[in-house]
Amino acid sequence: MDLSEPESSPSRVIPLPPTVHGVETVPLTSLTRTGGCAAKYAAGRLETLLAGLVPAEAEDLIVGLDPADDAVVYRLDDERAIVFTVDFFPPLVDDPRAFGAIAATNALNDVFAMGGAPLLALSVAAFPEELPTEMLGEILAGADERVRAAGAILAGGHTIRDAEPKYGLAVVGTVHPDAVWPKGGAQPGDVLFLTKALGTGIVLQAVRDGVAPPGALDSAVESMFELTKAAADALRPFAPNAVTDVTGFGLLGHTHELASRSGVRAILDAAALPSLPSALELAQDGVRTGGDRWNRAYAGPHVESQVEPALEALAYDPQTAGGLLISMPSERAAVLEATFSAEGLLLRRIGRIEAGAGVVLQQ
């Protein structure tokens, strides 16, 4: 995708030239141990870390640490609340502009996952001094394009020196206090939807391992460029019961969070899971990310899997800038599907909610 193109452009050319303004670029992934949302701190360890923190006593704190969600929400008055999030990670692709765009998309999507609209963003950056400044400019340019496409403004930020490059955003948005989409609100009888294909972690690992087939990286990058703004706008009139975005903890990790916070049992249909081109085949060949084992350690004790290893790996795969996981009453499902179809948006029905506890991944 040419990041200078408008959001609606059908033409998407992923690779950039090997130089930026005549300066030879450095392969960004050569400077990292892991990249994207696969670099997230292990969910199980994070729960232990946060367990010792006492939530602030604040009547207007609608969403904070108890329980944690995709972003915090603070009520300003009866009509307005602010949504605030921060997200950053090391490079997952070598293309600097693509890296900036993906990191920005991943952060902005947290606001959309809460039902909000982004207003302002600040860069959170760490760069080696040896990197050409033109490369850093490309990272910022990629981020700025995505922020503008989200309807927000990249207004500043903070940068430090670090041997491993990292980039992301702190984002502030707004939402009506009565229209926040919580992670914990799913009800028995709901159906589950997903708005993006799975497999970004597997594909990126295959690229690192040198076994990715032609075109696989392009498809993954195109998916990670996609803001969930259009999906959130289409969903908003339907008042979903629970929403989260699928990122570093994988589909099963985030489904476990949704189910446990809601006090329900989630049934996922493995055959219905959308996957990126080549992702399932790569999983069948044994490609796994480092985040796969952390996600299994976190969600595995709560998951009953009845499927073959490749489909299970797809469901545990850490995603970067993944889609929305939606739980909503079944009587509204057909109209939601028709709405997404009419707008040319991906929406896949992947399961249902029942009374009980845990997550079932069934064939």
Image: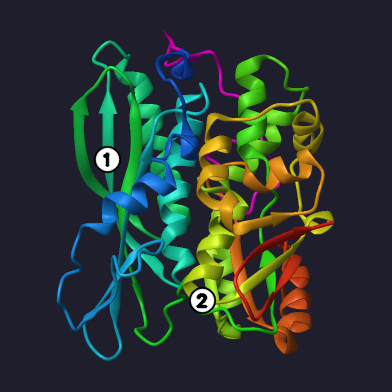
Q: Residue at x 78, y 69 (%)?
A: 341
Q: Is residue 228 visible?
A: no
Query: Observer-nearest residue: 282 or 264?
Result: 264
Q: Residue at x 69, y 57 (%)?
A: 304
Q: Is residue 295 above or below residue 132?
A: below
On the image, the x and y values in percent for residue 307 come to 81, 49
* Magenta stretch bounds: 2-26
Q: Residue at x 62, y 77 (%)?
A: 356
Residue type highlighted by circle 2: Ser
Classify residue 196 as left or right of residue 165: right
Residue type highlighted by circle 1: Val
Disc ID at residue 124: 1
Question: Callout 2: 10 Å neighbours few (<14), some, many (20+)?
Answer: many
Residue 243 among those drawn in magenta: no
Query: Observer-nearest residue: 215 or 316?
Result: 316
Count of labels in the image: 2
SS for callout 1: strand
Q: CA distance from mark 1 to mark 2?
A: 33 Å
On the image, the x and y values in percent for residue 266 come to 66, 69
- Asked whether the residues under the numbered discs 1 and 2 touch, taking CB atoms below 8 Å apart as contact, a structural biologist would say no
On the image, the x and y values in percent for residue 9 come to 65, 48
Q: Is residue 106 above or below residue 232?
A: above
On the image, the x and y values in percent for residue 168 come to 35, 41
Residue 267, picture quadrant:
bottom right
Classify residue 353 as left or right of residue 175: right
Question: Callout 1: 10 Å neighbours few (<14), some, many (20+)?
Answer: some
Residue 17 among those drawn in magenta: yes
SS for callout 2: helix
Disc ID at residue 327: none
The outermost residue toward the left is: 57
Residue indicated by mark 2: 262
Q: Nearer the viewer, mark 1 or mark 2?
A: 2
